[in-house]
Image (cartoon, grey):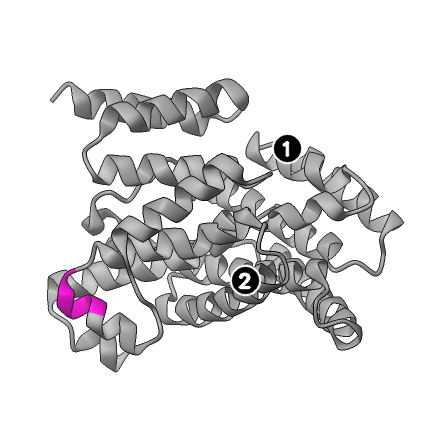
Amino acid sequence: MHLTRSMSGRSNVRFQVAIFVASALALLLMVPRALVGLPSAGLDRGFGRLYDLDFTGAQKEFESWEKVNPENPMGPVSEAAGILFSEFDRLGVLEAQFYEDDSVFAARKKYDADPLKRVLFEQQLDRAENLAKARLSRDAHDRDALLAMTLSNGLHSDYAALIEKRNMASLHYTKEATGWSQQLIAVDPTCYDAHLASGVSRYIVGSMAAPVRWVLRLGGVSGDKAAGIAELKLTAEQGHLLAPFARILLSIAYVREKDLPRAREILMALQKEYPNNTLFGRELSRIDQRASR
């Protein structure tokens, strides 16, 4: 808190935006390529339903998969993701907010989450982490366990930032998630989806003013705008289930860079692929409005 208060008004806003983007790790790392090696396509279908905002269908897929794979931490962490995103939808957090205007994000409100869902969310994450740590004690290179730890911290980060508006707590979880993600990439360098988190973080922090970048670097968060976009493109082009998220983030980057035609092209493709997700249509309308100004 002392660090935040010590910044100027504008730098403070940008610092909060940097924390948000890093905290969006759960959105950015929901289903990396490690899932391809799992014994069933149930998780794939479940996360696909989340893309289409079918939360009930997603949870049914996750529950069915978990019954067959009770010792795999990806079951409970996937259920936790479904709970979080259903809350996002209910509270309006999933409404199109591309955060191209720093002041819009800084002025966001704190939401009143469902306390029962909050408890269930935490229980699922605790169970996922216990299962993951047990597997890692037997095999430090267990991809599913590393992925589950990445997701668990990322989901904690999203909840803290986007529902509770606790930026510093979100940053803590983000750094934890990034560490697990780096271990995952070391185990499987072809896990291109795992590059998404560092890509968006590098891009946004690289967009900050020099004094803010310096402060964030002291906290272990570095930035490089060009490198960030390159990592997003890598995931978008070679990633597996996370490629659509990379395309979403690239469209946000293009909006920030005033390249509205490329942002629109990406969103048009996403809208066609996920017709039940109205988010893409709303963002397309906003882009068209900006382009007509």
- Toward the front, the furthest residue is 189
The front one of 130 and 105 is: 130
Secondary structure of the magenta portion, mostly?
helix
From what the image shows, is residue 123 above or below residue 1? above
Mark before the other along the chain sequence, 1 or 2: 1
The 10 Å Cα crowd at callout 2, few under 14, some 14 to 19, many 20 or more, is: many
From what the image shows, is residue 292 above or below residue 41? above
Which image quarter: residue 284?
A: top left
- Which element carries disc 2, helix, strand or loop? helix
The front one of 100 and 86 is: 100
Question: Is 287 within the magenta?
Answer: no
Give the residue at x 60% y 48%: 32
From what the image shows, is residue 287 above or below residue 2? above
Amino acid type assigned to the residue bearing label 1 in the image: Arg
Residue that badge 2 annotates = 181
Q: Is residue 249 left or right of residue 277?
A: left
The 10 Å Cα crowd at callout 1, few under 14, some 14 to 19, many 20 or more, is: many
Q: Position of residue 158 (x, y in %)?
A: 47, 57
Question: Which segment did they paint magenta?
Answer: 209-213
